[in-house]
Image: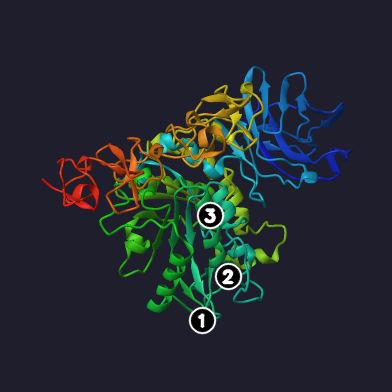
Amino acid sequence: MFKRVAVILMVFLPVVVFTGCAILESAESPGIQGEWISSDGNEIFVEQNGTTFIASHKSEGYQDSGNIGLFGVISLKMGNPARVSDTTVSGVVTPDGLRINWDGGEFWARRTVSVDPVKGDRPGFMLAGEESAPSHSAVPSDSNCPAGYSTWITDNIDILGNKKLTEISIPGSHDAGMYEANKCSFAGVGGPTACNTKTQEITVGQQLYCGVRYFDLRPVYTKDKEFYTGHFTDKLGNLGCLGGSLDEILDEVEGFSSKNPRELVILKFSHYYDRMNDKFGFSEPVLTELTELVQLKLSRLVKHNSSLNLMAMSYDDILAYGRIIAVFDELQTDDWGTGIIRLDRLPVYDEYSETNDFEKMKNNQFDKLKDHGGSANELFLLSWTLTQNKKQAATCNLDPTGETSSIRDLAIVANKNFNSILDEQNTINKKANIIYTDFVDGSSTWVAMQTNGITNNPGSISCEEDDDCANDTCARKEAGGDNMICCPSNKSGIYAGYSYCYGMLDGNRCWSDAMCANGYCKGNSGGLQKGICTSKLGPGQTCDVDSDCVNDACARKEAGGDNMICCPSNKSGIYAGYSYCYGMQNGNKCWSDAMCASGRCKGNWSGIKKGTCAN
């Protein structure tokens, strides 16, 4: 039986496959290259469009927990399923995934994106192995994480919305802005370069679409009086490199947040370095400039007052105040009203292991989870990161083979062992609130979903028919779109001859009220145009039409005003062609006695002038 499938994606055009001494070619499509690990030496035959590719046993062998390795290539074009088969293995590769049955036992591989370069698509990473315990491919150079990872919380808000932050798990990005390494402080042998400063491969915006929700941002104030991210050490003369522009990062966060109102994003600003004065830490004027930049760029910051206790609130309750939590180290005071919050307002236990040995890191982190996890007043950050030793940091740029272990090389070791996080959390019965990694590839999002009890995230799976879905519900995601998904609500319906997912969340486009979880498709003009699924408003809230309100009574608050509200009394009426809330309390301006709860509109001169509701 297959124990594990470790897959590395690679595009070939044409595909050239080396199997033993044979060379096989296909100019029709790109290929997926992988090591297929089995318990015997059977050849795997890969067939596509009548052409058979044979993946022979590697002559040098391949050992992984006693399993024999085979080397094979699956070549396919999107829409042209390929079949993997021999006497004991059968399965079908589709544009969305691969399922294989082996001697009656099932194990699973998931292909995440198109790999057709003619369409301009590029491969992402792959989850492979037994479905309950997949392994992961190497870190991708692209942001093509699985469909649905960008909205994984929104798609599962019924599971997560009522929970506190201490009760859920989210992916985090270590040194998130270091997806590039520029303007390094020293260019000599052993100095800072990408191999010892770069911690990510994809931008913060791309990380957001891969599901990351907690970002470690380390601002650097440059000699040009601009803010960048950076990775610098206070040893050996403050060596390091600049990463991405903070301006650009904040723009990406704002853009993502504007499109995804249910996805809470946490930005942690710390490890400040003033490159202009070559010192760590910011002066008060520079720190003020940083916070003002964040305020300027991010319109959706969580804002309230100092009484707001983020640890005591549910996820949905926090969203009522904003979508982005920005916390800053070294702030003496904070200003909740502008969304600028001290780091201690969001307590996080964050202690990395400072080792390049995976087993030592793993054991150290889970010992810490046992001792510090599960707190109602503090988030636990599982630092799933390996740290270069001095030799590796000093020599990695001298060895292009990577054998000296760059940060990236170490990240691949850590990231392919994510399964142990689930096993250990189950053993000690505690969960990590933040799963914190280098070289984000989407794997930590999968682990976070599993940790949260999201074992089947149908909203992330594209489909063509009901049979493709575990919930037998395949339909259009929203009005105006043709993309078919396995409906997160498990419900679908027909509108104008097309199937749509029903139970849509707020913000989705809709044709009818029936499509929306809250029963209201605002602005659909009776189904003649696309509307937006929107929660109905309570008494006193600003509205436009009766249907905006739970009580179906939207009218002017009082005489002489144009502002429309959902009437507190649940009653409205028409006066001189305009709708007004009736049952007004004493003190409100009125035109007629009928408008007042007391039945008296004092001084209205029989409707000739505005009066006041009174006893």
SS for dot 2? strand
Q: Nearer the viewer, residue 351 or 124?
A: 124
Q: Nearer the viewer, residue 44 or 526?
A: 526
Three-letter code for the amino acid on which mark 3 is drawn: Leu
Q: Residues within 10 Å of mark 1 (few under 14, many from 20)?
A: few
Q: Nearer the viewer, residue 155 or 387?
A: 155
How far is the residue under mark 2 from the one under mark 3? 21 Å
- In the picture, the quarter occupied by the N terminus is top right
Residue shown at 58% from the left, 66% from the top: 243
Count of picture labels: 3
Three-letter code for the amino acid on which mark 2 is drawn: Leu
Q: Which mark is residue 276?
A: 1
Residue on which disc 3 sits: 386
- In the picture, the quarter occupied by the C terminus is top left
| Residue 160 image offset from top left, x and y in percent | 41, 38
| Residue 44 image offset from top left, x and y in percent | 78, 27
